[in-house]
Structure formats: C-alpha cells, structure tokens
Amino acid sequence: MKVVRRSAVAVGIGLGVGVVATTGYALQRVASRRWRAAEDDLVAAERTMPADLVHHFVAVDDGGRIHAVERGAGPPIVLVHGVSLGVAAWAPQLRQLADRHRVIAIGQRGHGQSLAGDDGYSMERLADDLRDVLIALDVTGAVLVGHSMGGMVAQLLAVRHPDDVTARLRALVLVATSAQPITAGPAGPLVAAGLASGASRGLGRAERRGQGLFPSDGLALWATRATFGAHPAPADVELTRSMIAAMSPSAVSGLLGPLFAFDVHRQIHAIDLPTHVVVGTRDVLTPPRMARTIVDQIPGATLHVFDGCGHMVMLERADELCDLLHDVATSTPPSTPPASPPGTPPVA
C-alpha cells in the first residue's frame, strides 16, 4: 500500500512539474510575441545601419582582421561593443552623432566581419586590436566608448598602452561594464573557470550541430529580453536578438574564459584620463555596484546612473547617451601627448 501511495505521489509530482513546465513554455511564447519586431519596425525606429557608412578592414599582426565602420566629421567618438553583439548595436549613435562628430564603431574579433588570428581571444589581444585600429585610422583627440566587454577592453587598453591612450584619446566612457571578475571572493577564479569550461563544452556541441548560441528562437528572444530594463522597445530587443543569433558559438566559447576571469580593478587607478561610467539601475549583468567599483578606483571618474535602464544602454537610452557623448567630446580638452625623447619617431 505504501508503495502504491508513493508511486501515486511521484506521478502527481511529475505531472505537476510537467504542467508547470508546459505552462511556463506557453507563457514564454505568449510574452515573447510582445518583443518581436519586423524589419519595417526597425527602420521606423531608426535601428538599422545608415547606408552611407565608410567601411575599414584593418589587418593585425597575428593574421586577424578588424572591421570598423565610420560616419561623419568632427571631434571623434569611437564605439566598442560587448560580447555577442556588433557594430549594429551603435546604430542610434551612428545616426544621431555623425552630423557633429566623426563616429567610428569597431567590431571586435570573432564578431561580424572581424576575424580572429593566431592569438585567439585573450583580452590583451582585443586591447591590442583596438590600439591597432586607432593607429591605422589616425584617430586623435577621441572619446573612447566601451560597452560591457568593450568597456573591459577599453580599461585594459588604458592600462596596457598608456602612452598611446594619451596620444589618441581625450576621455573614456565606460558603459554597463566591470573591472573585476563576475564571481568575487577567493574561490572566484575557480568558479569562473568552471563556468567558462562548462559553457564552452555546450557551445562546442552547438557548433558541431550547426546550432546558434540558443537552441530555439523563442529562448533566444526570452534571454535577450532579460538584458533590458523596464518596458523595452520591441525594435531594440529584436536588433539585439539578431546580433546574438549571428554570433559563432566557437567565438563565444573562446571569449568566455578571458571574460569571466577579467580583473583590472587594482590597476585602473593609474588611468590618467577623464572617465565617465554609465550604468542602469536594472542592469542584471553588470549591476551598479560594479560601476561604483570603477568610479572608486579611477581618480576623478564620474558616475551616471540611468533609472530603470538595463544592460543595453546605447539602445534603451540612446538620446541620453548621445547627449552625454557629445558633451564629453566637446567640453573635455584633448590630452597633451608626453614629450618624446630626441630621435623618437612620432606615432604612426
């Protein structure tokens, strides 16, 4: 009798779990319809790339190739996207700022038309890529804007190549990013390595099966929505989802280890550049506490908090971010490069 009762309970629990799972899936499908947008919706929302972009392809010394797009003229603003995104993430800034600025959006290796070389995907390599593009495009007096992983790369560039930064940049704007590992504490590096290893194995299987980062379009849309704050525009969610869908799982796999282990919070005190740190109150990926850590470490850094905004600041608060970038680019005087010893060739 006890066996029968236990079996009945087990069956009941199993049915209950199945009902909950089925209901959750159904709710996910219903809710995700609100965030879908067609190409016409993206055009109407000005979330497509301008047709008059200038395209650059910069060869780097490990055999890689970095794609950058450019539009406009004036005080330069250089934009660097986060992991699994691309230059299209900056569509609003390329549209709104190009009448007053030279706007350059750089695609990081493994994303879009930017190809990795023999050095793979270390954060140091990404920082060197960024330096190479700034030199190749003869960028001076620029505001460097890094979102998420792009903000990490921007910080590492400033730490790794301070003389080049002084020669070419007037300010940093770090958007929804971090200076330290996502897992804190003494066991953080081990936890991060375990997470990266497990995720990489799963992504490797997906690549071999010809799949993307997510097993279904609905799940991808749901996960994309989670990166936004309150009441996102469907066009913004769809643009982000489309970039993630185009991302190679193997490239993400190569980036996860360096990304999870990234830590420069004890080095960024040496950054000698006006720095603005931007974060949304509803950012679940790089929450406000991470932004405050950066502000506490970089001398004179300014914190900008956008209420109700999530991780995708450049889309969710496009107008406010554009206004901030314009103000920084026009009110911050260009830095003075350090004097070179006699006989030292100028920076190319």
Image: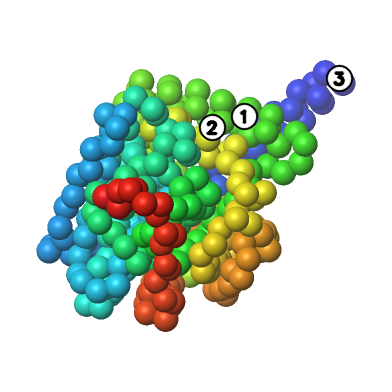
Q: Do the residues labelled 2 and 1 touch (CB within 8 Å)?
A: yes
Q: What residue type is labelled 2?
A: Gly
Residue 229 can be seen, yes or no: no
Which is more foreground, mark 3 or mark 1? 1
Q: In this view, does 199 lie to the left or right of 38?
A: right
Q: How far apart are marks 2 and 1 (CA)?
A: 6 Å
Which one is in front, 65 or 148? 65
Residue with the mark numbered 2 = 257
Q: Distance between the residues labelled 3 and 1?
A: 49 Å
Q: In the image, is residue 94 above or below residue 135?
A: below
Residue with the mark numbered 3 = 1
Q: Where is residue 31 in the image (x, y as percent from the top left)?
A: 46, 58
Q: Which amino acid does label 1 sit on?
A: Ala
Q: Position of residue 174 (x, y in %)?
A: 50, 61
Residue 193's label in the rendered image is: 1
The single residue placed furthest to the right in the displayed view is: 2
Which one is in front, 116 or 267? 267
Q: In the image, is residue 322 above or below residue 169?
A: below
